[in-house]
Every structure is written in structure tokens, then in C-alpha cells.
Image (spheres, coloured by chain):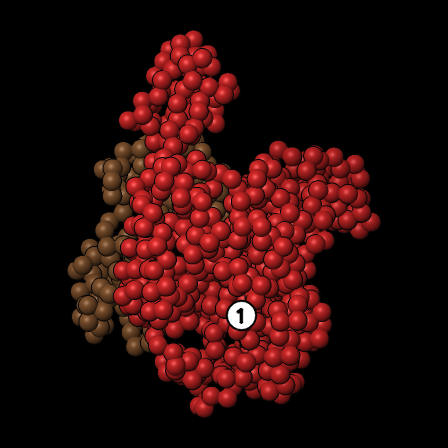
Chain colours: A brown, B red
Amino acid sequence: MQNSRQELDAILSKFKDRHGALIPLLQEVQLLEGYLKKETMKYIADQMSISAAEIFGVATFYSMFRLKPQGKHVVRVCKGTACHVSGANVILNAIKEHLKLEGEEDTTEDTMFTVMEVACLGCCSLAPVIMIGDQTYGKLTPEAIPGVLNKIVG
Amino acid sequence: MSKIIARLGLGSCGIAAGAEDVWVELKKVINDNSMPVTMEKTACIGMCFEEPVLELSGEGKPKVMLGKVESKDIKGILDGYLNDKLEYGNIILHEHEEAVHNELIANQQRIVLRNCGVIDPESLEDYEATGGYQALRKALSMKPTDIIDMVKESGLRGRGGAGFSTGMKWQFAHNAAGHKKYVVCNADEGDPGAFMDRSTLEGDPHAIIEGMIIGAYAMGADEGYLYVRAEYPMAIKHLRKAIADAEAKEYLGQNIMATGFKFELHIKEGAGAFVCGEETALMQSIEGKRGMPTIRPPFPAEAGLWGKPTNINNVESWANIPWIITHGAAEFRKFGTEKSPGTKVFALAGKIKNSGLIEVPMGMTLHDVIYKVGGGIKDDKKFKGVQLGGPSGGCVPASLLDTTVDYDSINKTGAIMGSGGMVVMDEETCMVDIARFFLNFTQNESCGKCTFCRIGTRRMLEILTRITQGKGVMEDIEKLEQLAVQIIKSSLCGLGQTAPNPVLTTLRYFKDEYIAHIVDKKCPAHSCEALVTYEIVPDKCVGCTLCARKCPVNCISGTVKQVHTIDQSKCIKCGACYTSCKFNAITKD
């Protein structure tokens, strides 16, 4: 804990007095802590003399910022136009089915996976596409999903 | 044996298709067999559907390009090429002989993509070898106003989609009072189904940087920002390296090319908000705030970033600049049409054979783009429509395929040129669902500032969802039209003003599909889940169990050689059974 506070302070001092620094600052903090904790946002507000409301406003405006902890593996399901017409919904359903996620749930009980929909991964020629970590999987079928996900867990 | 060069495409699409494994294998095969082969990296040549793509060349040998290369093929390919006995099933380009995609390249005119897939994007020397930074040298010897005149004469129009004259924009920023000015590159490519900017940023970062330095000099700016989507890690990596290399060679910095001209360039990573592609929202975001558009006037050219005069152009516009400076306005005007000179880069995707990135002269017909360059429709199905301009654009039907690709002709169809996303749809795509898809997108991405955009898009989405579920009524069509007009009239920025376009164009060209959903409760494309049922025809089912094994939710029951049945309450309508059945025993209705 002590260490991470020091690392957090190091990030804050790097961005102190730089104009327009809030977004890159939050990006680095999220990289450090996995998501933006309420206490951390309050701490940043105090240290940087920015109102907590402004920080919360920015954090909730941009889709990259997460306010909840996320699973070990993040599965990004591309919902771009090309993937949509190639059956992205079917892929998403198969993933949720396999991971037993219901309704609005996005993280598995064992916190192994978080499933997210993303606008476009820019690999349209390989549609439908998902990304797990940094690895892209293209030309997917619903039948291929259990295999792909099981391989990740090992 | 003469020395040969093996060049592998390692753009995002190549890597996604497995190019990194091929690279490792190349290295191994060359080393193990002491082959006289030099390995080089490049980015995306645009033929994403053929990735991984390998190009071979050497003295006295024809330049060839091979598609869908796998690690296991490498040894045979290199042996064959070295001994002039290359045998490979998928030669996609050949310098002297017929090859499958020779025409695909021949029908293109590559200005923006001139170096993409040709040079190593991480090598400044490679860029310089193609004449890189010579345009900057020339520009620095010219008067700023002469550069602006040249850009004006070229007729270059903003490639981000709106199509405003780039030269005029530069003139406004040049004329603005004050010493501190900014130039910005809008690389927040957010349209789903569009990846032109990603490929250009990954494949030729110096061209964009050179364009920006020239622009800064012409407008009198000393600082610039590249605002890049954070979803494009490779583009950001290549830009960082390119900026560092350009600084080291004094193409950027305090004394550029010893002329005393100063220019500093920064990268800003976006954080995931589509509206930040709108220029005033983008500036808010660079300032570290929520990316919400502001009222214009004042225009950015008068009061932009931190209140200073600012010029914003998109990636493709900037990448055109060095070429125009080098070759002149008249040369640029040789391509394209009178009112839309030059070329346009398109990302072809969807139900098209050659999905990837292409650059064609303006004025080509949509038909030629899709059939001559794009190779036609996947699996030779029936063409239904092409979506241009993403969430701000619209769907153009088959009857208008003779429309030429230029700003004004495309606007007439109700779609827009947009940034260049072109998603092709066939008979299996439901147009009501496509309209719903885009409204879902804009509704999500509306920043919430204007009431009609915030609430109106949500109401439109609710209506469209209802229709795709078979719960629509005829009055819904009228309501959609009313809402569309109100949203267009009452929104501040381009997002809201264009959000209804996908609905309006599908209503205009595909109204029969709306009526089929509402009146007959049928989806003619068999795509809307709620209106589709899969059933097994007892007479045809031989009990092979294949469908039961393919079903991801195990909702098909039956034993070997017995007729199977689908439990409709569990079926997720994925269609896996339908596509797998070899006996046509499953119906979709």
C-alpha cells in the first residue's frame, strides 16, 4: 500500500502545474491501480487542487476509465459496423453464455474475465473480432468461443 | 545467388492474422540455411484480407507479393524464389505476370498511402529515401502566404468528412491576430468500420508530421498536437518514435533545418469518446476537460486551444500536404474532379471480397470501387447497400451505384463522404437493424449537452428496437421522421446534426423493410433475432448429431439416427446449427 501511494505521488508530481494534464494523469493512475477508486480520486483532487466533481466528471465521460475493479483478462468484443453485420451479437452471446454472465454483469464471479463491448478495433477485414489482453482473435464463430476462452485460463 | 529482400507486413491487421509468428520463422529459416536474404518490416499495404502478406524482391528477379503466408510455407517459398522456381498457391501481385490482385492495385491512385506497405514506418532513413522532408525543405524556402495559396489552388478539401477547403482554413488561422498559435491533427478516428487513419499513422507517420510542420510554418504556429485514439497503440508507438527521430535530425525543434523556425509537437491520447472527433470537443479534451462541443463562433481559427488561434485538420488531409508541396497544385488537380480534386482513402469492410484499405481518384463510381477494386460481394451474394460515412452517414442502395465518389454527389444521396468508412451489405443484412445499430452508437456517444440529441436519439433508438422486435406500429415511421428533423435542427455539433442520417436514408431507400417488420412481423433479411426461428424438418433430418454438437447452448436434443429437435426457449438464434447442417434439414424463417 505504502509503495503504491509513493508511485501515485510520483505520477501526481510529474503532472503538477502542467496544463491539460488531467486525462493523461488519470490514464496513468488507472494503469497503476487497475481502476479509478473513489478514495484515489478524492486524494488527487486534494493534491492537485482540482475539484473532485471535475475529476469524477472526466472519469465518467470517457469510456476508457473504469470505476469498478476488472477481471484478470479483459475480453473486448468489437461492435463496429463490419463486426455487427458479421454477427458480433452472436459472438457476444456465446461469450456471456460460456462465462455464465447474465444481464448487465460484465465480470465473472472468479474475477478471471471482464467482458466489454468496444466501438471498433479497426480490424474490420477479420470481422467478427474480439481482443483478449493485447491479442486479437478474428473470423470467429460462436462454436470457437469456448476453445478460445478455455485456452486463456489454461 | 543474388541478394533478396523479404518484406513482411507487420501492421495491426497483419499481426492479428499471425504475422509475428511468420516473422520469427523467417528469421529462423534464413539463419539456419544461411540464405542471402535481408528481412524488412513494413506496415499495411491495404490488402488486409490477404494478411499476412510477404513481398519478395531482388536483383534480376520479379517483385512478387504473397498472401495468407503461414510459417510452414516459409522454407519452400524462400528456396523457390532463390532458385527462380517459386511455386505458391496465392501469389497476389506479380511484377511481370498475371496475379490475382494486380488489377486491385492498378485501379488505385496512391498519394496518401504512397509509402504504406512500402517503407519501414519506424525508419526515418526509409522515409527520407522516398523524398521525405524534401517538401519541408522546399516549403521553408517559400513565403508562408505562397504555401497557403498553393494549398488553396490544389483544391484540397478536409478529408475528415465535412469537405471544407483546407487552404481557406489555413488562411483564417494565418490571418488571426496573436503570436501564439496551434496546429492540431485530428486522429481520433471513431467511426465504427473505419480504419484509414490507423493504417496511415501506423504505416507512414512521418508524412503526417511533415505535413503538420509545413502547416505550422505557413500559419505561424509554434506548437502542435496529435490527438490519437488510445485504441491505436501501434499508431502511438510509431508516432512517438517518428517525433523523436525528427527532433534528432532537427526537422522538429528550436531551429528547424537551420532556418530559425521553431515547432514543437506533442501526442495526446484520447480516452474513448466519439464526440471528441468534433473539433471543439477535441480541444476541450486536449485541455483536460470533458469533451463537450462549444458554440461556434468563435471558430478555432480565432479562439481555439486555450483561447489561441488553432487549426485542426484530419490525418489524411495532413498526409496530402507534402505531396502537394513537392508536386504542385496543378499535378494534384490532375486527379479527381473539378470540385473534389485528388484522391480519397476508403476502408472497405463488411460483405466484400477484398476488405482492406484502398485509395482511388475522386470521381470513380461506387460501382467501380466495390466491384473493380473491392472485388465484388463476398460469396457472390446479392448486393443490397453500402454504408458511407459511419454514424453520420447513410446507406446508398444498389440503384444509386453509379454515384461518383465526390463530396457533392454523395451528399445528394443523403449519405456523406465522411472520413472514408465503406461497409458493404448484402441480402442478409437488415437495414432496420443497421439504422438501430447506428442510433445505438450515437445515443451512447451523445455528450448530453443538447436536449434533442440526448433524449431524441434515445427515443429514436427505442422505436427502432421496438420495430426490430416485431412490436412496431405504422405511426412509428412518422415519429421517426419528426424526431429526425427536430434533432437535426436543435443540435449544436455534427454528432447530433447528422445522427438521424442512417435512419433517414434507410427510410428513404428501404422503407419496404420497415413495413415488413411492422405489418408482417417478418425480417426479410432473416437477421433480426426476435423475428427468426430455426426449426428442424423431420423428413430431412438423418440424425447425424452434428447440429447438436455445434450448438453452443446445448438446446438441440436427439440421439444418433433419430430426428432432432430444438428447444426454442433455450435457443440463442446463433445459426450455428443452420450453417452446419449438411442435409438442409434446418429452416430459418
- Tell me which residue sits at (19%, 68%) in the image: A53
Residue B519 seen from this side: yes
Task: State the image coordinates of residue A3 (x, y, percent, origin top left).
Answer: 23, 57
| Depth order, front residue of A37/B343 | B343
Task: State the image coordinates of residue B471 (x, y, percent, origin top left).
Answer: 30, 41
* Position above or below: A70 against B522: below
Identify the amino acid type marked 1: Gly
Q: Chain of mark 1?
A: B
The residue tagged 1 is B163
* Position above or below: A66 against B281: above
- Tell me which residue sits at (37%, 46%) in the image: A76
Task: State the image coordinates of residue B265 (x, y, percent, origin top left).
Answer: 48, 74
| Depth order, front residue of A51/B254 | A51
Pick out the residue farthest to the right: B60
Q: Quadrant of residue A4?
A: bottom left
Q: Quadrant of the C terminus of chain B?
A: top left
Q: Quadrant of the N terminus of chain B?
A: top right
Task: State the image coordinates of residue A94 (x, y, percent, origin top left).
Answer: 36, 34
Pick out the residue farthest to the top: B561
Label 1: state its secondary structure: loop
- Tell me which residue sits at (33%, 60%) in the image: B483
Residue B7 seen from this side: no
